[in-house]
Image: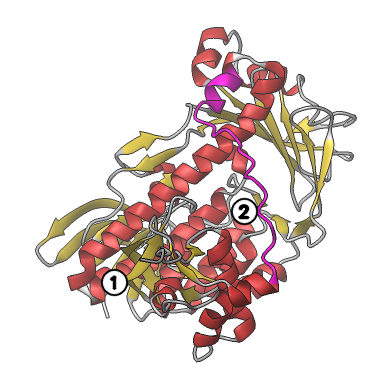
Amino acid sequence: MADVCVIGAGPAGSVFAARMAQLGHTVTLVERAQFPRRHLGESLSPGVLPLLETVGVRDGVESAGFERVRRVLVQWEGAEQVREDPRAEGLLVDRGRFDQILLERARTLGVRVLQPARVVARRETSEGWSIRIAAESGHIELKADFQADASGRSSPAQRRHTGCRTLALYAYWQGSDLPREPRIEAGDDAWYWGVPLPDGSCNTLVFIDPAEFRATRSGSLREEFLLRIRCSSLLAGCRDAQLAGPVEAIDATPYLAEDCVSATSLRVGEAALAIDPVSSSGVQKAMQSALAAAVVANTLLRRPESADVAKRFYRANLEDASGRHARWAAGYYGKVADERGGKFWRDRSAGAEQETIPEPKPPLDAQTMATSAVALSQQLEFVELPCIEGDFVTTKAGLRHPNLDGPIVYLGGQELAPLLRELRPGQTPVELAQAWSGRLRLQSGLAIAGWLVNNELLVPEPQPHAHGAA
């Protein structure tokens, strides 16, 4: 058991704290704001609900009565479209209530919560961390073996920008006929996002280039915001919409923290990684990073001999997520750049990968699977990869091949390297799947064998050269 201090009780901090408590550690969570409070990120992507199950809070969130997202109005490239989710797994939440539910779950798991409180000094020592906290009851001196920074964009991280600098202007509205469905819209040199909230209000955001904003600004922040909102359709048809508070501005530039992990500390959530806001999945990514970070921290604390592997895994995990989101965002911005051009869109589409449509492969027929012997591709490599196994980071044999997006260890929950090492000369895919019957069902084995053949990790076995008569 180790003493862990977590700074920040947003989704990443509360999920990390809860998971560390589940893993048997003593956790103190420090949050400077009093909950509930308003916070951006009210539209949650469908991937959030399954993540909540890990710390046992899905039922609590679902019973809170947050509205499900069934439709999103999209006016991006071309005419307006309706994006529908028949399963309605996205949520429109009051972030004050949502974050409070996550925090209370951490508390019920034994996490000590100091709120409102703030860290005024922290120092790493030979025995861990010495942390001074200013709380309502006075100053607290905390000794911790490990500390996690989940303080979001206020974290003093060494950051590398992974996309164009972006400024978000936003404000909340009240009225009797405000939109009841989320809306995303592309403008000439900005894009807009409208989010209806459970209390009947609506949050509207404008994402712009900060340099262009500074160069052209001629009025107050409120005036500049209203000028831009009128260029959109976010409040079209709303006759009595009125601002319910001040206009705010916040940096929305994506970035990656270079100093994300050490032997006794890590950054989690937006303290480690901020993705482009166009993905609308920042909360989901923060929670995913928190769950991975808990396994990394648990490994650093309980298996120090695996510290290098754990740190390498965490850095690679964040780097991979950052790269994938950046490429996706560039491609999404590129759709507008192709239609209307403009510096704003061209800059944000830089780095988009050209979409290639692979040659269609003939379907595998049963006769080929049963009669054609296969061998390992000469382009296939077996490599050691850090990965999560249970509650720890470890290394396992993985596969690297030009036809794969990156090295992989598992397919359908099965380790691939041990399966492929059972391949014997002259075996067909069906025979190989039958050889795996001791560890997985034949149907699953056939599906994996077919995938390996389709992706050319298994190729036709070379035929021996024929020799003519002497």
Looking at the image, which residue is at 53% across and 70% down? 104
> In the rendered image, is residue 134 in sight?
no
Amino acid carrying mark 1 in the image: Thr
Q: Residues within 10 Å of mark 1 (few under 14, many from 20)?
A: many
Circle on res. 442: none
Amino acid carrying mark 2 in the image: Arg
> In the rendered image, is residue 133 in sight?
yes
Q: Nearer the viewer, residue 11 or 401?
A: 401
Q: Which x, y percent locates residue 21?
A: 40, 76
Where are the magenta residues, as a range?
344-365
296 in magenta: no
- Give the side of residue 153 with respect to residue 450, left or right: left
Chief secondary structure of the magenta portion: loop
Looking at the image, which residue is at 48% across and 33% down? 253
What residue does disc 1 label? 299
**What is the number of callouts on the image?**
2
Label 1 element class = helix
Circle on res. 95: 2
